[in-house]
């Protein structure tokens, strides 16, 4: 969708300022049309109720090999059961995430992958996605109250069908820890001491990559929750606290202490490339989501383990866990309206979740009726960590305003990584832009 100064053609309630604020987004908008064509299928886009159609279109961000095969398995099962073909448009994960605003205003696929969190609620509030409360009336018994809450918009209606979740944690190779007699740290001081020892042992202590902009959010989220508590962190994400607060500066100051142990040149590296250091045993540990295991051969998964983000302030503790929920949303005007809802009902079933996790055993089921008897060690430990948490965050780019996350947080965090001593001016700029964006939306 080409940009225009007037904002003409935007849905009611969606401001040009909110969606296209900042040079980064303006530049990005130039590239949008070809991608939208790739994302959206054919048809008139009018939102018909074509109950006779044997095809439903599906927009997928599962571009890596493992999730791509997992979705293939799920939709093969659906075709076998229903006779309906799911026409999948797979787009690079990062591209899909960055271009979702424009995608939803064009001709999005009937059903598409997305995440729980404030960003989901934002799209619901703007009328960019479909209400699936009727689907929840049929499948709600498969999910906990917490999952329903995570799927609900500010108006009390459901807009999201959960598929899976996974924790962010420090991943490592058991054989490396055993070789050097390393112990999983439980405090920040122990983590720093371990990183120092790893460096002395010739390892890259901490794998790190931020070419795509979002991986660094994980470190900030955890440090903020460990130092300032979950409530402060979520309030900061909601624009209710200031980025210039001394508490936020303390987070970046603490992070800076650990940067000398991070893998260098992170802005030129993807998370998949950083994971290779862990796989090849040249890196000691790596803070990422459990999906990092997708980069490991199946025969090496038994050597794979993680420890939770350590305590930084004993008064705050470690009861908050970052565990994003991935799932599905409905286009606001699906071409195959009835078929889309039937597909979502299937995707909400234990049968569909079992098929997905059989191919992608790095995540945890959110369907209470899913078969967990075949969980591997990482899945069992992930489920225990998530279930033990008092509070669960989704991730900065899901908990914060989407425009702020994409056009302010990403470049600001990358500026910090380039020049960590400039944090004062970086936070001043972030707060100025946050105030403008949150007040305009």
Image (cartoon, rainbow, N blue to C red):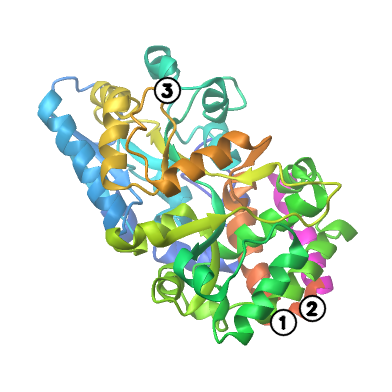
Give the position of the N terminus as an image quadrant.
bottom left
Quarter holding residue 190 = bottom right
Q: Which residue is mark 2?
A: 422
Q: How dense is the environment of label 3, judged by Cα within 10 Å: few (below 14), some, or many (20 and up)?
A: many
Q: Which residue is mark 1?
A: 419
User: What percent of the width, then of the height, locates residue 408?
Assistant: 66, 62
User: What percent of the width, then of the height, locates residue 339?
Assistant: 23, 24
Q: How dense is the environment of label 2, judged by Cα within 10 Å: few (below 14), some, or many (20 and up)?
A: few
Q: Nearer the viewer, residue 251 or 390?
A: 390
- The residue that appears at 45% across and 18% down in the rendered structure is 133
- Give the spatial CA distance, label 1 vs label 3: 45 Å
Left or right: 438 in relation to 42: right
Which of the labelled discs sits on residue 132, or is there none?
3
Q: Nearer the viewer, mark 1 or mark 3?
A: 1
In the rendered image, the vertical position of residue 249 relative to residue 405, given as above or below: below
- The residue that appears at 58% across and 19% down in the rendered structure is 156
Residue 436, magenta (yes or no): yes
- Give the spatial CA distance, label 2 vs label 1: 6 Å
């Amino acid at each position: 969708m080409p940009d225009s100064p007037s904002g003409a053609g935007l849905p009611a309630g969606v401001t040009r300022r909110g969606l296209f604020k900042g040079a980064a987004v303006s530049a990005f908008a130039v590239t949008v049309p070809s991608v939208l064509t790739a994302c959206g299928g054919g048809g008139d886009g009018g939102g018909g109720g074509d109950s006779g159609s044997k095809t439903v279109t599906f927009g997928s961000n599962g571009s890596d090999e493992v999730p791509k095969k997992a979705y293939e398995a799920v939709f093969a099962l659906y075709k076998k059961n229903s006779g309906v073909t799911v026409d999948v448009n797979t787009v690079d994960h990062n591209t899909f995430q960055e271009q979702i605003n424009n995608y939803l205003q064009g001709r999005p696929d009937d059903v598409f992958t997305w995440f729980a969190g404030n960003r989901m609620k934002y799209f619901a509030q703007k009328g960019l996605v479909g209400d699936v409360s009727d689907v929840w009336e049929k499948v709600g018994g498969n999910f906990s109250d917490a999952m329903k809450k995570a799927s609900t918009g500010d108006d009390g209606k459901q807009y999201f069908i959960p598929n899976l979740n996974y924790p962010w944690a420090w991943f490592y190779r058991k054989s490396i820890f055993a070789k050097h007699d390393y112990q999983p740290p439980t405090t920040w001081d122990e983590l720093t001491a371990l990183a120092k020892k790893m460096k002395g042992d010739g390892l890259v202590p901490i794998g790190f990559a931020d070419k795509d902009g979002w991986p660094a959010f994980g470190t900030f989220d955890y440090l903020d929750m460990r130092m300032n508590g979950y409530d402060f962190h979520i309030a900061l994400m909601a624009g209710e606290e200031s980025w210039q607060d001394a508490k936020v500066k303390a987070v970046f100051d603490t992070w800076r202490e650990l940067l000398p142990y991070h893998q260098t040149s992170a802005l030129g590296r993807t998370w998949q490339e950083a994971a290779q250091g862990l796989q090849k045993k040249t890196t000691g540990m790596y803070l990422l989501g459990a999906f990092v295991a997708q980069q490991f051969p199946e025969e090496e998964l038994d050597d794979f383990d993680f420890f939770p983000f350590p305590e930084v302030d004993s008064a705050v503790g470690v009861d908050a866990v970052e565990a994003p929920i991935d799932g599905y949303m409905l286009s606001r005007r699906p071409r195959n309206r009835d078929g889309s809802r039937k597909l979502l009902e299937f995707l909400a079933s234990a049968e569909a979740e079992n098929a997905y996790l059989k191919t992608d055993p790095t995540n945890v089921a959110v369907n209470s009726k899913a078969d967990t008897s075949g969980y591997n060690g990482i899945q069992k430990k992930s489920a225990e960590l998530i279930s033990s948490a008092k509070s669960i965050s989704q991730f900065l780019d899901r908990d914060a305003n989407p425009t702020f996350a994409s056009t302010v947080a990403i470049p600001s965090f990358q500026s910090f990584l380039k020049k960590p001593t400039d944090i004062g001016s970086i936070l001043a700029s972030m707060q100025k832009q946050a105030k403008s964006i949150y007040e305009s939306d």
